[in-house]
Image: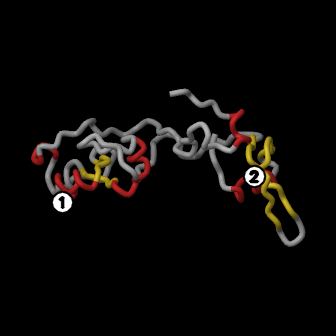
């Protein structure tokens, strides 16, 4: 499952790549036509992404791997208070890689500064590794947040 923009949904529909199962009560208009915006669609065929294998190294994927949790203090933070930290600082030849970069809150990152966790007396909560896969953050919805037309297609776990 994936959430796509209404523009992408219309393109998939017009190209015949997806069928519309539900519509929103919203219309978009062109000069000559009016179209109801799809709410739930089903792809007619699935094409596996080209780069299956390694998970792309980027800020958002590191945050997802670390569950948006500072790997030093263990507190979960919003994006505004999160940073990436080199376990072995870049100034000490630490690589920018899955095994050397972790999620850190701003306070912990500044406290650790240009030192290793051992030098700073700040042990890591978990050893950074390259993930084999990451869950999609597109559908991180709680019951009550999704449009009504989505409910029968989603399975929410209680708790």
- Pick whichever, 159 or 67, lies toward us: 159
Residue furthest to the right in view is: 32
Number of marks? 2
Q: Using the image, tell me which numbered label, if any, was put on residue 159.
A: none
- Pick whichever, 80 or 109, lies toward us: 80
Q: Position of residue 123 (x, y in %)?
A: 18, 39
Of label 1 and label 2, which has the lower sequence position?
A: 2
Q: Residue at x 50, y 38 (%)?
A: 135
Q: In the picture, which quadrant includes the N terminus?
A: top right
Residue furthest to the front in view is: 144
- Pick whichever, 116 or 120, lies toward us: 120
Q: Position of residue 69 (x, y in %)?
A: 34, 43
The crowding category of the residue bearing disc 1, from other C-alpha atoms within 10 Å (few below 14, some 14 to 19, many at least 20), is: few
Residue furthest to the top in view is: 158
Q: Residue at x 40, y 54 (%)?
A: 79
Q: Position of residue 118 (x, y in %)?
A: 12, 43
From what the image shows, is residue 149 above or below residue 80?
above
Distance in Å between CA atoms under marks 1 and 2: 47 Å
Q: Using the image, tell me which numbered label, if any, was put on residue 91.
A: 1
Left or right, 66 with reference to 85: right
Residue furthest to the bottom in view is: 31
Q: Residue at x 34, y 55 (%)?
A: 81
Q: In the structure shown, which secondary structural element does the residue marked by tag 2 occupy?
A: helix
Q: Position of residue 116 (x, y in %)?
A: 15, 48
Left or right, 141 with reference to 109: right
Q: In the structure shown, which secondary structural element does the residue marked by tag 1 occupy?
A: helix
The crowding category of the residue bearing disc 2, from other C-alpha atoms within 10 Å (few below 14, some 14 to 19, many at least 20), is: some
Q: Residue at x 82, y 66 (%)?
A: 29
Left or right, 127 with reference to 145: left
- Pick whichever, 121 or 147, lies toward us: 147
Mark 2 sits on what residue?
12
User: Which image quadrant is residue 10 in?
Assistant: bottom right
């Amino acid at each position: 499952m994936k959430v796509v923009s209404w523009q992408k949904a219309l393109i998939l529909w017009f190209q015949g790549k997806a069928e519309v199962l539900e519509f929103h009560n919203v219309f978009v208009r062109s000069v000559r036509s009016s179209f109801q915006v799809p709410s739930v669609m089903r792809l007619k065929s699935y094409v596996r992404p080209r780069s299956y294998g390694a998970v792309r190294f980027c800020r958002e994927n590191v945050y997802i791997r670390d569950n948006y949790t500072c790997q030093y203090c263990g507190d979960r933070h919003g994006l505004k208070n999160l940073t990436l930290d080199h376990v072995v600082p870049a100034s000490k030849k630490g690589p920018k890689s899955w095994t050397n970069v972790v999620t850190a809150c701003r306070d912990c990152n500044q406290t650790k500064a240009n030192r290793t966790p051992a030098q700073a007396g700040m042990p890591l909560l978990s050893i950074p590794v390259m993930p084999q896969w990451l869950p999609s953050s597109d559908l991180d919805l709680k019951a009550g947040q999704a449009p009504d037309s989505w409910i029968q297609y989603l399975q929410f776990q209680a708790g």
